[in-house]
Image (cartoon, grey):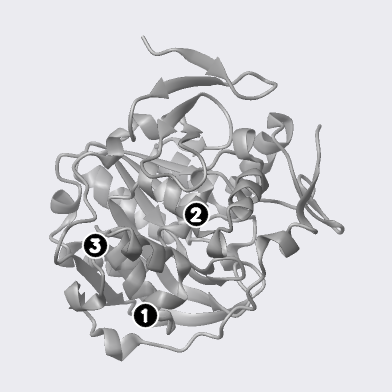
Amino acid sequence: MKKKKTITRREFVITGVAGTLGIASGFSFADPAPAVAIVKIKEENIALAVEEAIDLLGGIEEVTRDKQRIMLKPNLIGPDPSCTTKPEVIRALAELMLGAGKEVSIGEGSAAAPGFNMDEQGVHFSKDPGILDPMQQYVFDQLGYTELAASLGIPLINLHTGDMVEVQVPNAYVYDKIVVSKALSEIDLLCSVPMMKTHVLARVTLGMKNLMGLYPGSAYCSVRSCIHNEAFKRNSPCVSFEIMDMVRACPPGLTVIDASTSMEGNGPSDGKLVKTNLIIAGTNPLATDMVGAKIMGFHKNEVATLAMAIRARMKPSSLDYVEIRGEALESVQMAFERPDLVPWGEINSWYGAKEIHT
């Protein structure tokens, strides 16, 4: 029996877990020639494009082989649908997986919402379930995810609160152990489903950056200011330390990038929308993010998380070793407007500087 301990004033249970979660087993960044699918969305048919992308990877049975319990992790930064993963993408993936006999859930821990931890003075942080729970439910409701999960008959999981597990992080940059929702210890495959966006802290939001939503607010604050503060003390470039720690603890075995509509400029919420009409998918998170960044017009060395992953000897080290399936990469490449990068030390003056309680 694992030893239990508490992490918050409300005493949410943590169960110690030796090593990384089960979702890490069978996955390797050492695949020498990973495939990434690029599919154009035709006639606004997002579901068809998602299915085509998965088919290009070998089909749903292949990408979920030996994996029965799957969590879809969308990018729901807040209640504004213009800067979040479209429910249609999640529905298409869920229906494919359910059709293959898989157990599917949707999990997310959103950053902020007006009236909860956000007002005219800024975005505030909280570890209080009395704020985190209704805030997350409000975001789910506003974006149509509550209705989506109910219509599919699958669980919709708030990753901020509830039972937690402690996970060891190999070669950690910030913490040797991190706390995540116990729900993540009960799945075999994590599927990261971000919206393609620029980001003033991380430069881009793609599959690996999307994993920041796995840091629970009950342990690391609703806007992750606690983990960002610790990483900033260690000179984390573009919040890449905290991203890399979560990638190592909870690596996604499938990444599907919602690039139906993307965001350029000062994302992740104040940028300009771009109609890109693409779905990008792959089973290697580094390869998939490298392709996504290239489509946006970013070199791998411009994105700290990608550069750090390559320095850590994760594979592939270059797009030369990635097999592109579907649309030619050159035919869909764009030149996104760059974000005005802001270091966490500056942004924290208005984003996460004040703690609030119920």
Say whether residue 325 is left or right of residue 118: left
Image quadrant in which you'd find residue 135: top right
Which label number is shown at residue 241? 2
User: In x, y percent, where is residue 165?
Assistant: 45, 27
- The residue tagged with tag 2: helix, strand or loop? helix
Which label number is shown at residue 315? 3
Which residue occupies the foreground of this view, 78 or 173?
Answer: 173
The answer to whether 21 is drawn above or below residue 76 in the figure is above
User: In x, y percent, where is residue 33?
Assistant: 14, 67
Nearest to viewer (mark 2 / mark 1) = 2
Say whether residue 121 is left or right of residue 309: right
How busy is the neighbourhood of tag 3: few (under 14 within 10 Å), some, or many (20 plus)?
many
The residue labelled by disc 1 is 294
User: In x, y percent, where is residue 208?
Assistant: 41, 58
Q: Are the residues at dot 2 and dot 1 in contact (C-beta closer than 8 Å)?
A: no
Which label number is shown at residue 207? none
